[in-house]
């Protein structure tokens, strides 16, 4: 009997499990732009346009490969993926559906509840299966990424020299994380001119989602596998060599620095994690990129990315709702408007609005750090990140936001919260130089809000964190301050927070 093969907007590869299982001579591929996926958060228009354009191009590729494809554009007004499948099931006289397990519990549950015979296949586009992650995690007191990463190195053979790591070390971070340099010698991500299919999507998205946060034009993302491969080659040649050195740096007029800007392609299926890592390793073996850059880059992909996915699925559907610090404040309006005197936040939000992209340290140490210090409800923070970044799908976004950035999971992802005063931002960026606040001022007129909120956060959460061995120093510094200074800091932090 004919079967329906579901392909979602982040499963755009012929290597996805449902397509590998399907038979082009007999089965029908179903792809659908639907209101629920386009609207479960107010996605950035660039994210929607990327998704729809890449879906439409992929549908064409599948047809060229001999598949029958039912493609439902958003103008068909289908409410959900389920509705699209039910309509296709009636049209093709079959109840059999083969799908690759989606990357969000929400959609997994929706597919499981359908009145159709749905087979969910494991998504094997990752290095570690759920079972492998669980075997690794079982019985461990702490799930530290570094140990998991070493397993992934052994499993993939990436940067291995026999049984050990190349150059005798697993991790070269010691050589990384330099402050922002004066000159950037990489031109940034490869940019593509939209073709006719993409232009049609852009016009439609402008019309339907033009009110969402985010600017649609200029739109230069790759929307096919061929383009994404070119973007990868461009990064390996020009960006990778200094990726490690400056991965934590931030510059106001350099939005991309030496980052790869590949996450959206990777997460949508246009690129494969192993092919990216192999390209990086090849550059290292050829002497074109140093070990600190290549090891650091590969660690992000087979380490952090895989680890985050493992945590999301291991922790279960309630993960995004966790809030162990009981933070209840609403997300400030400036996360949507960029209207704030804090230059670091303004830069990060403006860049997010324009590009649907910010790099890791902007997400973690600027917007994330602020939200955590200010005690913003982590679910609101989660929804913001899920909406505004082109690479955001819950399986990877939630552990980064709820776990790594907001510590709302109580320390599963991170052994301590990622918080800092303005000093860190000043060291790693040029943001403070043009800011209305003074990073060197700790209290009083013009004091950098991060300086006030940092101590306020530590003081509020003393019971939870003062015994953490990695935070003892911070509490000792606080305790050494005289009581008047402490009172001033807490009072001024309170005034700032009340004004949010
Ligand atoms: P590079 O800096 O060039 O890194 C190379 C690749 O490593 C990335 O393409 C990505 O695939 C992978 N990677 C790096 N760090 C991580 C990480 N912590 N988790 C998973 N993969 C990683 N990444 C997403 O893909 N989607 C998200 O929704 C997302 N949300 C985030 C939210 C917060 C609060 C934080 C702190 C991080 C988040 N990240 C997310 C991780 C990281 O910031 C992005 O993967 C990275 O900025 C993407 O840009 P890039 O491709 O230029 O990455
Ligand atoms: C992100 C997204 C958007 C905006 N729209 C669609 C869509 O209309 N149809 C679709 O199949 N997928 C879309 N996606 C990607 C899905 O939201 C994604 O597959 C799930 O969140 C699971 O990760
Ligand atoms: Fe951000 Fe403070 Fe620096 Fe201003 S002074 S850019 S608020 S860290």
Image (tube, grey):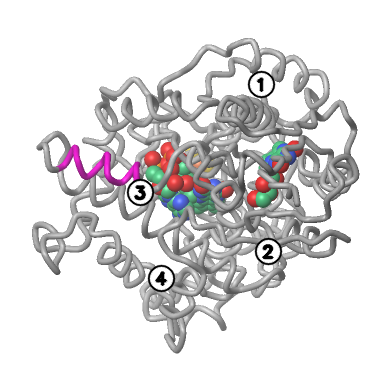
Q: Is residue 1 visible?
A: yes
Q: CA distance from mark 4 to mark 3?
A: 40 Å
Residue range of the region highlighted in magenta in the rendering: 275-284
Q: Is mark 4 within 8 Å of ligand 3?
A: no
Which residue is painted at 28% across and 67% down in the image? 150
Q: CA distance from mark 3 to mark 2?
A: 28 Å
Instruction: Check disc 4 and report the residue beneath it.
Output: 474
Is residue 276 on the magenta stretch?
A: yes
**Discs 1, 4 touching: Cβ within 8 Å:** no
Instruction: Check disc 2 and report the residue beneath it.
Output: 320
**Residue closest to the eye, 414 or 451:** 414
> Relative to residue 10, is residue 229 drawn left or right?
left
Q: Nearer the viewer, mark 1 or mark 3?
A: 3
Q: What secondary structure prevails in the magenta region? A: helix
**Discs 1, 2 touching: Cβ within 8 Å:** no
Q: CA distance from mark 1 to mark 3?
A: 31 Å
Q: CA distance from mark 1 to mark 4?
A: 43 Å
Nearer-N-terminus badge (1/4): 1
Instruction: Check disc 3 and report the residue beneath it.
Output: 274
Nearer-N-terminus badge (4/3): 3
Instruction: Check disc 1 and report the residue beneath it.
Output: 216
**Residue closest to the eye, 141 or 270:** 270
SS assignment at label 2: helix
Q: Is residue 438 visible?
A: no
Nearer-N-terminus badge (3/2): 3
Which residue is painted at 45% across and 64% down in the image? 307
Q: Is residue 282 above or below residue 424?
A: above
Q: Nearer the viewer, mark 3 or mark 2?
A: 3
């Amino acid at each position: 009997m004919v079967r329906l093969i579901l392909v979602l907007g982040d499963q755009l590869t012929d290597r996805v499990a449902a397509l590998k299982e399907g038979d082009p001579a007999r089965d029908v591929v179903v792809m659908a732009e639907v209101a629920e996926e386009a609207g479960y958060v107010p996605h950035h228009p660039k994210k929607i346009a990327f998704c729809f354009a890449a879906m439409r191009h992929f549908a064409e590729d599948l047809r060229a490969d001999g598949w029958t494809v039912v493609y439902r554009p958003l103008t068909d007004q289908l409410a959900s993926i389920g509705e699209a499948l039910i309509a296709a099931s009636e049209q093709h006289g079959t109840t059999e559906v083969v799908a690759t397990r989606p990357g969000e519990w929400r959609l997994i549950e929706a597919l499981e509840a359908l009145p159709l015979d749905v087979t969910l296949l494991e998504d094997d586009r990752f290095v570690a299966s759920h079972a492998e992650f669980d075997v690794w995690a079982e019985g461990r007191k702490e799930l530290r990424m570094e140990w998991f990463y070493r397993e992934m190195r052994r499993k993939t053979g990436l940067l291995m020299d026999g049984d050990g790591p190349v150059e005798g070390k697993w991790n070269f971070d010691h050589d990384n994380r330099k402050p922002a340099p004066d000159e950037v010698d990489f031109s940034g991500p490869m940019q593509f001119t939209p073709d006719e299919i993409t232009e049609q999507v852009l016009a439609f998205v402008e019309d339907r989602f033009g009110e969402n946060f985010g600017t649609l034009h200029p739109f230069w993302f790759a929307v096919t596998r061929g383009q994404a491969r070119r973007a990868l080659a461009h990064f390996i040649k020009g960006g990778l060599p200094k990726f490690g050195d400056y991965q934590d740096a931030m510059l106001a007029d350099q939005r991309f620095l030496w980052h790869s800007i590949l996450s959206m392609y990777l997460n949508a299926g246009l690129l494969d994690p192993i092919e990216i890592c192999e390209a990086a390793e090849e550059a290292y073996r050829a002497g074109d990129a140093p070990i600190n850059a290549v090891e650091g880059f590969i660690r992000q992909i087979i380490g952090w990315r895989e680890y985050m996915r493992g945590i999301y699925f291991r922790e279960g559907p309630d993960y995004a709702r966790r809030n162990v610090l009981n933070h209840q404040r609403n997300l400030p309006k400036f996360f949507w408007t960029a209207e704030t005197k804090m230059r670091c936040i303004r830069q990060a939000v403006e860049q997010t609005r324009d590009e649907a992209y910010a790099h890791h340290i902007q997400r973690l140490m600027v917007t994330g750090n602020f939200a955590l210090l200010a005690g913003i409800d982590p679910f609101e923070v989660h929804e913001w990140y899920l909406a505004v970044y082109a690479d955001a799908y819950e399986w990877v976004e939630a552990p980064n936001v709820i776990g790594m950035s907001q510590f709302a999971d109580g320390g599963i992802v991170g052994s301590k919260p990622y918080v800092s005063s303005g000093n860190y931002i000043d060291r790693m960026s040029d943001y403070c130089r043009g800011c209305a606040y003074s990073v060197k001022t700790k209290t009083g007129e013009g004091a950098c809000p991060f300086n006030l909120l940092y101590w306020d956060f530590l003081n509020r959460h003393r019971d939870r964190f003062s015994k953490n061995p990695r935070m003892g120093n911070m509490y000792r510094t606080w305790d050494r301050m005289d009581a008047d200074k402490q009172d001033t800091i807490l009072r001024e932090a309170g005034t700032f927070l009340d004004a949010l």
